[in-house]
Amino acid sequence: MAQEHRMTGAQAIVASLEAEGVEYVFGYPGGNVLGIYDALYDSSIQHVLVRHEQAAVHAADGYARSSGRPGIVLVTSGPGATNTVTGIATAFMDSIPLVVITGQVETGIIGTDAFQEADITGITLPITKHSYLVKDVRDLPRVIKEAFYIATTGRPGPVLIDVPCDVQAATFDFWYPLTVNLPSYKPTLRGNKRQITAAAALIARAKRPVLYVGGGIIASDASGELMELAESMSIPVAVTLMGKGCFPAEHQLYLGMPGMHGGIHVNMALEQADLLIAVGVRFADRVAGKLADLARSTKVIHIDIDPAEIGKNQEVDVPIVGDARGILAGLIEELRKMGAQPHCQDWLQQLAVWQREHAIPCAHRGDAIDPAAFMCDLARMLQQRDDDFIICTEVGQHQMWAAQKLPINRPRAFITSGGLGTMGFGLPAAMGAQIANPESKLLCISGDGSLQMNIQEMATIRSLGLPLKVIVLDNAALGMVRQFQELFYQQRYSATLFDESPDFVAIARAYGWAAACISTPSQIRAALEWLLSYDGPALLTVRIPQDALVLPMVPTGATVDDVIIARPEHDGREAEL
Amino acid sequence: MSDLHTLSLLVENKPGVLTRVTSLIARRGYNIASLAVDRVEDPTLSRVTIVVEADATPTEQIIKQLHKLVDVHKIYRLDDEDSVSRELALFKVAVTPDQRPEIISITNVYRARVLDISPDSMIIEATGNGNKLDTMEGLLREYGIKEIVRTGKVALSRGLRD
Ligand SMILES: Cc1ncc(C[n+]2csc(CCOP(=O)(O)OP(=O)(O)O)c2C)c(N)n1
Ligand SMILES: [Mg+2]
């Protein structure tokens, strides 16, 4: 047993975080966390004072996604707590480990609608992996230990701890437990041997296999095993938005991204495969569309740590519950014992043909910057530099252009809100990622709409001296929604077009950032050179046409046969492209 | 309509646990037909017996999701063959004094009990499975049921497991 020390609940919280090895806490103070803030004053833990609690959660999330360590948030009761909701939901949807500590009003007045009281454990019930309302100071160390354990094991996720202010003030003999005792929480890690053998047999026989992999590979740190499996059997790899980087984009077996805005050849591959080896993916509607109509003959192996994901959206032939890394290693071993040899040359050639035939060329249109072509320019420049890049995105068209065109070659180097699609996520998440990775170059790809959802964090970034870079693709529009209106609502642009954008350059400068704006293709190269080598926070506004589309696009609920590859002819208007 | 499935859960006996269970089922879009909760042999645990309205596949999904709740220890899916179940109902029936013998004979046939007799009404207690209570309810309705309360189903599996 560790040594006991007499201390307050607030001090115990900080001591527990220290015992967990926490280096950064993202937060915002208030009346019901004064004690904890006071204890932090003496701690080695660094506190990042954001400008809005939502951003604290996104920053902790970006910290977690880019480092693999849990992100920690500290906010006050009431409005401080409710401001975290979007951030918590974002992390929950993408299975990101967070520990969120909220202050609460005194135990005795809970339930009386006291000043700054909000039932935050109730509000966040459906968006947390677990939560606690601590009513006895002696429970604090155990609760914090459990919270870290639950957040980071199995399928990771956010855990919330609500601490009334009298519990923070109460004193007790503190010692931090070394282990947890949670009889009802035992995630399955090891895959079932018999299922692994069955899966290996399917892989050994498959003529048209596809590895369909996602965020689970990153969470389980299984990129090495994925690579070994893909290479040993020459299996092409389709990587979801959440999985980007878990298999290098420069690898010859890399197929691309499936889904609504994924490569046509990738979606065709998923549909025509005779075997899908799905690892750490959830057959999300944005990816799988109507995959339910998969050819009857397609066999599906589904590997996931969460048994509830298996069979939820897709019927499966061989389910394997457990940690992807160990299961992939087991598959490799099993295939080796079988003496299985790669035999998919015809399939790989077929895929290469499809890729060539269905490539959508992108080029700037005259004097206007084409956003997809801009991303290709950026990709080329990033490849020329040997910096270690982390790309963060907001949500919208710019996110999809980035996902389509920027090659990501290592895990944790592409950070985006996939499941919830939260505008306002990117800038604070980039801040958290930069804090976790001071040596990396952080690039946040943003839109004029999204940036304004957490723009105040430019102040935090400036005051921390973080050298992160923001590229705003400014179409003076909520472009992604405008695109849906153009294609599916008869060009009735209800509430998606702005008359004009604010002067982002002036705003950035007011926050103490360097900033520039470009609007023609000829300016791109120099502007990016400047941005990428600038020492300090800098923003580049890139003016793009309001009507640019993200293509290809498989409409909601349709199949790859219905894919849109060019602007359709609208009434009285010629098709372009 | 979807089928009814009986789930028996052993959960932590703590505030908020029942909310976690029921809100999860509601959030996934399923209706709870009945619910019964009480403490069990071990005072730190409670048993929740839930009847959900869902098809077979969604029920599997509900069970898997419930398993993920940290406060849920065990979940048993009980079907009629390998479990016994009971429900208790109290019926308050409007009856004139000369109708009382008829009610008493219905009560006897269904092995129910008369709990209370007032000048203008009687309260009957009945236990059994849902069907039996439904039929009894139908018969008593002829006289005029003023109030009903039913506990919801409780069930246990037959024999010993794990
Ligand atoms: C918080 C939030 N509100 C609304 C939406 C719906 N939405 C999705 S994309 C989008 C437009 C985003 O605009 P912008 O950031 O300018 O990106 P663009 O699509 O123009 O590149 C909107 C409103 C969302 N995803 N998140
Ligand atoms: Mg925009």
Image (cartoon, grey):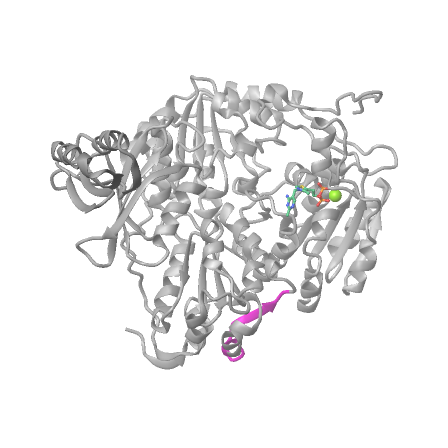
Q: Position of residue A333 (x, y in %)?
A: 34, 36
Q: Count the marks: how many?
A: 0
User: In the image, is residue B67 part of the stretch drawn in magenta?
Assistant: no
Chain part drawn in magenta = A39-50
Residue A341 versus residue B158 in the image, above or below? above
Q: Position of residue A420 (x, y in %)?
A: 56, 44
Q: If the picture is divided into quarters, which one holds ligand 1?
A: top right
Seen at 35% across and 81% down, the residue is A5
Q: Position of residue B64 (x, y in %)?
A: 35, 40
Residue A274 versus residue A19 in the image, above or below? above
**Identity of the residue furthest to the right in this view:** A367
Seen at 50% across and 74% down, the residue is A36
Residue in the foreground of this view, choosing between A529 and A149:
A149
The C terminus of chain A: image quadrant: top right
Residue in the foreground of this view, choosing between A108 and A574:
A108
The N terminus of chain A: image quadrant: bottom left
Residue in the foreground of this view, choosing between A554 and A214:
A554
Q: Position of residue A113 (x, y in %)?
A: 51, 65
**Identity of the residue furthest to the bottom in this view:** A6
Q: Is residue A48 visible?
A: yes
Q: Is residue A539 left or right of residue A130?
A: right
Seen at 71% across and 61% down, the residue is A458
Q: Quadrant of residue A324?
A: top left
Residue A370 versus residue A563 in the image, above or below? below
Q: Is residue A447 visible?
A: no
Seen at 15% across and 38% down, the residue is B112
Q: Quadrant of residue A565?
A: top right
Q: Is residue A402 left or right of residue A502?
A: left
Q: Is residue A489 left or right of residue B17?
A: right
User: In the image, is residue A49 part of the stretch drawn in magenta?
Assistant: yes
